[in-house]
Image: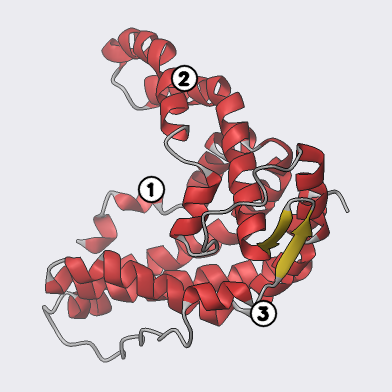
Amino acid sequence: MINNLSVDHFLISPTVKNAIQRFVCRSAGKAHKACNIFVSSIIPDLMTEMKEIFTEKEMMCSNMGLCAAKTKRVTRPTPKQPLNELWKTMGTVKTSNGEELMSCFECTLGADTLLEEFIDKRQATADDIQAEACDHVVPGAWGPGCQDFVHMYMSTVLFLTYNQFDGRGICTMIHTCEKKENALMALAKPERAQIGCANCQAVEKFMAENQEALHAHAVDEIFSNVCQKLPTALGTMCEQSVIRLSEKFFAQSAKLAASGAMCSQVCLI
């Protein structure tokens, strides 16, 4: 039955929160405090919502088309404007190399900075993975072999994985960037950091004021690219789950952005 699913342990928020903070935030360099704040603010509510989704047996049964539910399904929100147009309302930034959309500049700067930190700290991450996987997941007799394998290869695997991504590509994928030219690339690191922090609060303000629009676009993208491609029963369950989790995520993100906590840690303002 649903209550006996093995995912129950996974849905314990401290377990998930601690894992993300250990494997992600600890490798985020100067952003590690902001990462910890974000994870502590968002993950517990998301895990609580997910647990409720899995334990609402009548609604899950209804979403899979196996029975009728008294509770009404949540409605999928419709975006009111194209996502790239929404990002444009954030404005532009002026640099010594020309103007750039603020959404593109801040997104690319943040993504590239994190990727650089992850690459630099890949050995520490590999050591954490080795300790967790070989000591707590792999059966005892396999432990020594696991230790040797992970010690020899995990750092290289992480390096190759991180290098499959770049900030510009990530930000183009989520429509914060719209042209190939990139004012950010030719800038020295001090200027990048100075401009990034000078506009950080504007980004927080945007996130705080546009939670419903961002929620609608997130649901639309996931529904179109994931849920709609699943069999009908699973697709409906996917859609309903995504709507609820996305709404919770952006509501909590908006509260966090309005508090100014993220920029105060990243930029030490």
Residue placed at 48% from the left, 57% from the top? Answer: 172
- What residue is shown with label 3? 209
Q: CB under 8 Å between callouts 2 and 3?
A: no
- What residue is shown with label 2? 155
Residue type, label 1: His
* Disc marking residue 9: 1
* Among numbered discs 2 and 3, the one appearing first in the sequence: 2
Residue placed at 58% from the left, 72% from the top? Answer: 87
189 in relation to 200, above or below? above
Assign a secondary structure to mark 3.
helix
Residue placed at 47% from the left, 21% from the top? Answer: 131
> Which quarter shows the N terminus?
bottom left
Q: Is residue 212 left or right of residue 254?
A: left
Alpha carbon of mark 2 to alpha carbon of mark 3: how far? 40 Å
Q: Position of residue 159 (x, y in %)?
A: 47, 25
Q: Position of residue 10 (x, y in %)?
A: 39, 48
* Among numbered discs 1 and 2, the one appearing first in the sequence: 1
User: Can you tell which quarter of the image residue 26 is in?
Assistant: top right
Disc 2: CA contacts within 10 A as few (<14), some (14-19) or many (>=20): many
Alpha carbon of mark 1 to alpha carbon of mark 3: how far? 35 Å
Disc 3: CA contacts within 10 A as few (<14), some (14-19) or many (>=20): some
